[in-house]
């Protein structure tokens, strides 16, 4: 963030590791096919490593950075991932060393001018900057989806920070430092979750925590009984999907 890093997610770092869904393998396969090589990937603002682990299956080395020491402490270990506590503009990577730089669910928090200066230095010629953001979750039940929309837009809606506007727009108008690739395939993130797992995911939202701080109770309380009645058995796993908006820019060769 331009006025200094604010660690919004440190208090729920453990829940972030447990309840954040994983990105589709097809996304990483597609990105790897477009890169000039597979020596080094930099996953910036890695959180607890969801994207880094996907990259590690395809790249020889992944450097995964996050400004939150709490998030890094909960990151998923992998022999090809080096986790570092570092801000977006301070990777410590050499010039022209990375085949790809990824930012999952976080570019809206950055001082983008400073980050893009780092991107221009670190990426190899022909390398990729890939950023993505997920939309609202939905299930296989219209009644549940209506409750989820009410939770996100009405109950915790006033507690979203201003940067949330970039998420709602899918990053579509956000500037990138290089020419943008067009005609990208569509990607969907998916999971099969019980009701407690879905509620755990909502607990990782910054708006959820801010609501609790302001009002002294969990924001799910107003809809919990109705959600439980509509869901059925809490242990029933339902399919959950999130649309992913992916934007990719290539550094000129």
Image: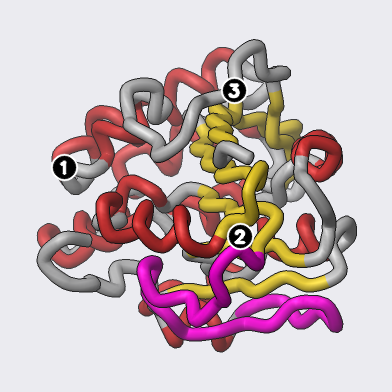
Residue 106 coordinates in the image, percent (x, y): 42, 52
Per the rendered image, the range of residues in magenta is 75-97
Q: CA distance from mark 2 to mark 1?
A: 24 Å
Left or right, 131 with respect to 38, comes to left
Q: CA distance from mark 2 to mark 3?
A: 31 Å
**Element at badge 2?**
helix
Quadrant including the N terminus: bottom left
On the picture, is 116 further left or further right than 15? left
Disc 1 target residue:
162
The answer to whether any part of residue 167 appears in the image is yes
Label 3's element? loop
Which residue was labeled with disc 2?
Answer: 19
Was residue 230 drawn as part of the magenta stretch in this picture? no
Give how far apart the Cα atoms at labels 3 and 1 are: 27 Å
Task: Find residue 181 and name its label.
Answer: 3
Q: Are marks 2 and 3 in contact (CB under 8 Å)?
A: no
């Amino acid at each position: 963030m331009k006025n200094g890093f604010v660690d919004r997610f440190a208090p729920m770092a453990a829940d972030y590791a447990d309840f954040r869904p994983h990105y589709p393998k097809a996304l990483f396969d597609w990105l790897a096919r477009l890169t000039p090589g597979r020596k080094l990937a930099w996953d910036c603002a890695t959180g607890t490593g969801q994207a880094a682990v996907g990259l590690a299956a395809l790249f020889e080395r992944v450097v995964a950075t996050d400004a939150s020491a709490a998030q890094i402490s909960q990151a998923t270990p992998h022999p090809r991932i080096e986790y570092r506590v570092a801000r977006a503009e301070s990777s410590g990577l050499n010039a022209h060393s990375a085949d790809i730089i990824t930012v999952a669910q976080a570019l809206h928090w950055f001082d983008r001018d400073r980050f893009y200066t780092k991107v221009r230095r670190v990426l190899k010629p022909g390398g990729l900057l890939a950023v993505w953001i997920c939309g609202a979750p939905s299930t296989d039940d219209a009644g549940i989806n209506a409750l989820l929309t009410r939770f996100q837009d009405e109950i915790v809606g006033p507690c979203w920070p201003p940067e949330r506007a970039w998420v709602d727009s899918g990053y579509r108008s956000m500037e990138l430092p290089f020419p943008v690739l067009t005609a990208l395939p569509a990607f969907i993130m998916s999971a099969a979750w019980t009701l407690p797992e879905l509620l755990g995911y909502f607990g990782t939202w910054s708006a959820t925590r801010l609501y609790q701080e302001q009002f002294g109770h969990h924001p799910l309380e107003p809809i919990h009984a109705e959600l439980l009645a509509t869901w059925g058995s809490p242990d029933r796993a339902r399919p959950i999907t999130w649309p992913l908006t992916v934007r990719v820019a290539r550094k000129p060769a």
